[in-house]
Image (spheres, rainbow, N blue to C red):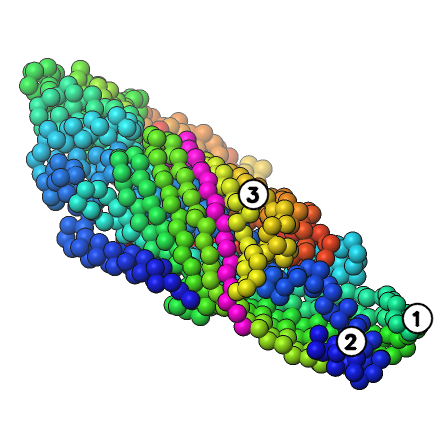
Amino acid sequence: VNVVQDFFKQNLLSFISALVVITVFFVPFALAAPQFIQQVIIGSSPNPLGSGARALGMGSAFIGVADDATAASWNPAGLIQLETPEISVVGSFLSRSENYKSAINPESDGIQHSTSADLNYFSAAIPVQLPWTNAVLSLNYQALYDLNKSLDYTFNFNGSAPTPLGIPVVWNIKQQNHVRQTGTIHALSPAIAVQITPYISVGVTVNWWTDRLDNGNGWQQDMTSIATGRFGLGRPTLPLSTTLVQRESYDHLNGLNFNLGLLWEINEKLRLGAVVKTPFNLRMRHHLSTVTSGDVTGRSQLDESARLHLPLSYGAGLAVRLSDVFSIAMDILRTEWSGFYIQSQKGVPVSPLDGVPMSESRVKATHQVRLGGEYLIILPDTVIAVRAGLYYDPQPSPRGIDNVYGVSVGTGYMYKNLVFDLAYTFDWGNSLNGSASGIPNSRFKLRRHRVYASAIMHF
Amino acid sequence: MRTKLEIGVVSALFLVWITITLTSCGPGIFQQSAANSGVNAGESEKVFRHRWWNYYERAVSRMNNGLDQEAEADLLIALSKRSMDGRRARTYGMHFTDYFPHRELGVLYLQQGKLDAAEQELLTSIKQYPSAKASFYLNRARQKKIRTGGLDTTPPRIVIEGEEVFRKPTNALSLDLSGKIVDDQFVSGLNIQGNPYRIEQVSSEVSFRQTVNLSSGINTIEILAQDLAGNQTHRQLQVIVDRQGPQISVDKIKLGEEQKGMYLLTITGVAWDRQPIKSMSIAGHQVHVESETGDFFSEFRVLASTESVEFFAEDVVGNQV
């Protein structure tokens, strides 16, 4: 408001200029996100990433399987199956393209592409003998949210508005936006599984979301918006050039939640797993700095605390071992997305998907359905695994649910006490809501490729 | 701000983690406790989760410690959960183990003198997944059974296929020796030329086939068969190997009068070989050789310009000169 008043005091043209700039820059953001804190880009999927190439190769149907060192992330009760110490390390590569189409800004249409590579998982597990039963302890590092994303799009603003002079102000402005978001949210997760009866086990993973151990937990978004064009009273004759640079970061993350797991080994062929991932508040610091230069100048800064509330999810999985070499699995996981919101220090909870207050949000719960299989070729000195899966991975959307499907293939190679796994997944969705990316009234086609590589060593 | 509660919970969990790990580590970290499993410490080196492989591994461990009854109980439980012997049976995840409960039970029964039960378990093991150990103990079980019952007093028979071939002289470098050993109980061993012949499956009839290398002269092939009761049969085959062609000795060559540019050539001599001579020719003319003396006589016309004539002879074995 002060900026507007200063310009008004100087002259009318400046006032009109400011009016145009405000219209060009802030109206779209105001439409998408009434408050700065509400503008959160959570990639294409707020669903957490899976852990481990073996699980991903099986279409992430692993709640009922959970029999390797990544069990802490799928179903901690599955850890009980480990009879020897194991360590595992998993790397991931992600490539995502989003083909946008906007109903009101066709000039912003186009393919947005981003890639990232990260340490996906690291764990060490050790079976121990408690006085009354068996237990397995594990310590895990898991990257659960990949927030790397790039967006480059353009808006054309051609319009007019009435003025007190009776002559409308006319503008033809082109706004070029470049957004780079980088970061991951990861957790340090000790876990324990305990055998209750010979065939029933329970487990808990404590996810400690913190950047105390490293400074890489969180994400940062850099946006540059360049507006160039002409405007004027009656005709667009006066040039305009303005640049807005905005840096927004969320760091100093701190939160705690639990994965509670149950595993019932019904018989030698059938296993049933269940998992509950408790909701939690991820407290963090939110920094926002905005610098406007060119025909209009300005500077603002914000430093506040905020919290991202991640929702409750729970599910069950069935694993069937048809023979030593062939097994199949199926999972269903429900996530209560109504509990997914972000809240600034003094603000109201809003949806990170579109910035709408949660009281008005129409986001719905989703059900992931995952199917997978594993076939082993057992040779005298080695074992080669062939895996495949398919899944329905719906994304929460401001307007309900966006359908995303996926297929996966994977392989594994075991030599002595070393296991190497490799998985490739392909996700696709044909009409996802693009509002969270800052392009109002847009839909996009999603094509996501992921490659996971794991190494597990048994002792 | 991190709440004190969260930090406290995490710290407590780490403390529990470290405490459990440290108190559990040491020589007995993977040993099951007596309270949990009911066995003495040291019998099993892995976590016991009541799975088939846990029972199997514990049974083997108990057998090694002389706890036969407990081992038998474990093997029976393991078999009730998984009944197939085999290598690289899948336990969990990407873990595999060799699993032979029928075989181990057979060995256990053999040690206990339950010979019929031992034979049955070992036969089942071999049927499901043949192993040298199971074959060895099956032989032992049957041997014990036969000896105890005095069931076998007849030695095995050695039957050679195409034995008449070995009676004929040959110039071959090797011969295929094949046949079978037949016993009223079980054939347990076979030696050919002093080398043990691998018997895949112990039975009352064992087939064999082996290539025997031959040297010039008289070759003696030794075959020794034995049954489980220890009865033996010995056979010798003698094979005559001749790789030399006939020898030809010319006694007299006579050249007759020339007529029209041709001479009458008369040759007499002796052709000799260890084997009967099958055929002989001089300059393409067939020559009769006396079978008793080897004498031959040949008369034919040759051109006046002829400088040499070719002799050819072949014995019945096929050696030529």
Query: Does residue A401 appear in this view?
Result: yes
The boundaries of the magenta stretch are A303-325
Quadrant in which the N terminus of chain A is drawn: bottom right
Residue B181 lies in the magenta stretch: no
Q: Residue at x 42, y 44 (%)?
A: A276
* Circles 1 and 2: CB atoms closer than 8 Å: no
B101, B296: nearer the viewer: B101
- What residue would you read off at disc 3? A365
Q: Outermost residue toward the bottom?
A: A10
* Circles 1 and 3: CB atoms closer than 8 Å: no
- What residue would you read off at disc 2? A18
* Nearest to viewer (mark 1 / mark 3): 1
Q: Residue A166: which numbered mark, if any?
A: 1
Mark 2: give few (<14), some (14-19) or many (20+) Cα within 10 Å: many
Mark 3: give few (<14), some (14-19) or many (20+) Cα within 10 Å: many
Residue A280 percent coordinates (x, y):
45, 53
Relative to B55, A240 lies left or right = right
Which circle's residue, 2 or 3, is located before the other in the chain? 2
Q: Chain of mark 1?
A: A
The relative height of residue A102 versus residue B185 in the rendered view (above or below) is: below
Residue A307 percent coordinates (x, y):
50, 61
The relative height of residue A350 versus residue A238 in the rendered view (above or below) is: above
